[in-house]
C-alpha cells in the first residue's frame, strides 16, 4: 500500500473523539430501550396471566402488540 493512500483513508482525530464519546452513549440508549421494553412486556404478560375476564386478556394482548410495534 502506498503511504499517501493509507494516510487519506486514516480516520481524522475529530472522528475518533466523536465516536469515543457518542458510541458508548448510543450503546447505553440501546440497552435502556431493551430494558424498558422487556420491563413493560413482563408486566403486561403478568397482567395477562392474572386476568379473570377475557376482556382483560384481550386488552393485555393488544397492549403487548402495541408496545412492541411502537417501541
Image (spheres, grey):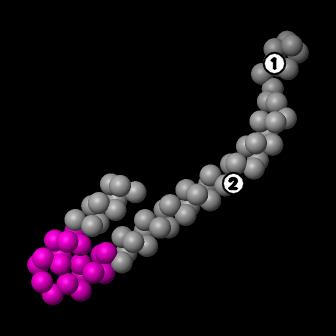
Query: Helix, strand or loop at disc 1?
Result: helix
Magenta stretch containing residue 56, yes or no?
A: yes
Q: Position of residue 26 (x, y in %)?
A: 62, 52
- x 22%, y 68%: residue: 61
- Local packing at callout 2 (Cα closer than 10 Å; few below 14, some 14-19, many 20+) is few
CA gap, disc 2 and disc 1: 27 Å
Residue at numbered disc 2: 24
Which of 9/19 is in front?
Answer: 19
- x 36%, y 70%: residue: 41
- x 47%, y 67%: residue: 36
| Residue sitting farthest toward the right | 3
Q: Position of residue 10 (x, y in %)?
A: 81, 26
Q: Position of residue 70 (x, y in %)?
A: 35, 55
Dominant SS of magenta comes to helix
- x 24%, y 78%: residue: 48
Region of the chain picked out in magenta, as a range: 44-61
How many numbered marks appear?
A: 2
| Residue sitting farthest toward the left | 54
- Local packing at callout 1 (Cα closer than 10 Å; few below 14, some 14-19, many 20+) is few
Residue at numbered disc 1: 8
| Side (left or right) of 48 relative to 23 | left
Disc nearer the start of the sequence (2/1): 1
Magenta stretch containing residue 46, yes or no?
A: yes
The quadrant where residue 4 appears: top right
Which of 21/2 is in front?
Answer: 21
| Side (left or right) of 2 relative to 25 | right
Amino acid at each position: 500500500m502506498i503511504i499517501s493512500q493509507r494516510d487519506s483513508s486514516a480516520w481524522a482525530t475529530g472522528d475518533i473523539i466523536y465516536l469515543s464519546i457518542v458510541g458508548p452513549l448510543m450503546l447505553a440508549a440501546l440497552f435502556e430501550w431493551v430494558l424498558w421494553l422487556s420491563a413493560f412486556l413482563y408486566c403486561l404478560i403478568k397482567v395477562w396471566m392474572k386476568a379473570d375476564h377475557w376482556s382483560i386478556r384481550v386488552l393485555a394482548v393488544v397492549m403487548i402488540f402495541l408496545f412492541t410495534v411502537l417501541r
